[in-house]
Image (cartoon, rainbow, N blue to C red):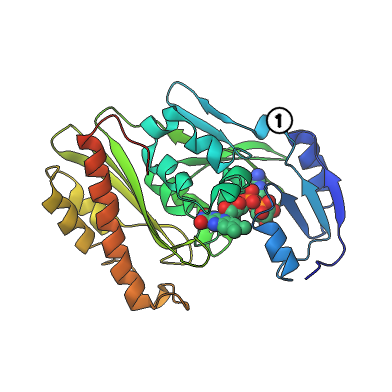
Amino acid sequence: MYPPEFDYERADSVDHALELMDEHAGEEIELLAGGHSLLPTMKSGLASPDVLIDIGHIEALQGVETNGDGFSIGALANYADVDDSPEVWEGATAFADATHRIGDVQVRNRGTVGGNIAHADPASDLGGALLASNGTVVAQGPDGEREIPADDFYLGMYATALEPEELLTRIELPETGENDVGAYAKKPSPSSGYPIVGVAAVLHTDGEEIESARVGANNIMDHGVRLTPTEEALAGEPLEEETMEEAAEVATDELDDVMMMEDLQASAEFRAQLTRVYTKRALLGALDRLESAPPAAAD
Ligand SMILES: Cc1cc2nc3c(=O)[nH]c(=O)nc-3n(C[C@H](O)[C@H](O)[C@H](O)COP(=O)(O)OP(=O)(O)OC[C@H]3O[C@@H](n4cnc5c(N)ncnc54)[C@H](O)[C@@H]3O)c2cc1C
């Protein structure tokens, strides 16, 4: 299917993109990053923007950088950029693991981290990973830059805390400590590769006990959520398989059954069961990695 006609503008810099967004204020605007979600939505008639602002060539939004405390992932970094970074695998393992498991090689070479997070598809692999990694979304708008903690970013299905006049410029991820570890486990849809359920876990440990944990899941509610009963069940417990299994059992205890995602691939009840199973896999995956330090890349 062909999308309806639209205007095309190409931005050369972040300031230029913001100028173009201001110029077209009041019209339906979409930003073109990797185009891997936007173009299918336009072709299927679900989005019909008046204007596409192509941000895909803005140099300042590219790449992955290591700073003193963690990582700065440019909005236009693609998944392969993250997956290819040994530093991110070492210091933000759950996030690297999630990017590694997105789609196929073409999608990983083309789709962007910023586009994925701004799009806020409930099935995005990065929803749970951003929450578990305690990431921060950095946005630039007419009034300057602002930081949005992951916990405040996702508001609902395809809905985020980004304002219409703001551009997501980068993601900041803190670097985990030497006894910390993370992993992502996903039940991929056999047809699309998107997760039916995905769970990311980051364990902060002293080498023997879990001091604290962050566990995030995607595609179980209308946006990425933290599994707080599991986080609470892990805190202060020994790094043992039994700890992980027990903590996974309570993963869905505080989720509202009525709001649980339900589609042709999984009923709400099956999805809740998958969530407990994939929480266990993520936790056991993290434990495995800790026992075979340094963190190993996924197969
Ligand atoms: C065959 C296929 C398989 C896929 N499998 C998976 C999968 O397994 N897991 C998964 O998570 N995803 C999957 N995807 C989706 C893919 O990851 C997309 O790349 C991603 O969802 C959107 O990123 P993009 O760069 O392509 O954004 P685009 O499609 O260019 O844009 C998406 C939306 O985000 C907005 N946007 C883009 N960049 C910014 C920005 N910097 N600031 C503000 N708004 C912005 C746009 O306006 C648009 O509304 C798949 C896609 C395809 C085609």
| Amino acid of disc 1 | Glu
Q: How many marks?
A: 1
Q: Residue sitting at 32 percent across and 41 percent down?
A: 182
Q: Quadrant of residue 226?
A: bottom left
- Nearer the observer, 158 or 112: 112
- Nearer the observer, 84 or 72: 84
188 shown above or below 98: below
Q: Residues within 10 Å of mark 1 (few under 14, many from 20)?
A: few
**In terms of secondary structure, where does tag 1 sit?**
helix
Q: Residue sitting at 29 percent across and 66 percent down?
A: 252
Percent of width and height locating residue 258 = 39, 78
Percent of width and height locating residue 100 = 46, 45
Q: Residue sitting at 24 percent across and 58 percent down?
A: 229
Q: Residue sitting at 80 percent across and 66 percent down?
A: 3
Q: Which residue is mark 1?
A: 59
- Nearer the observer, 157 or 162: 157
Percent of width and height locating residue 175 = 39, 30
216 shown above or below 297: below
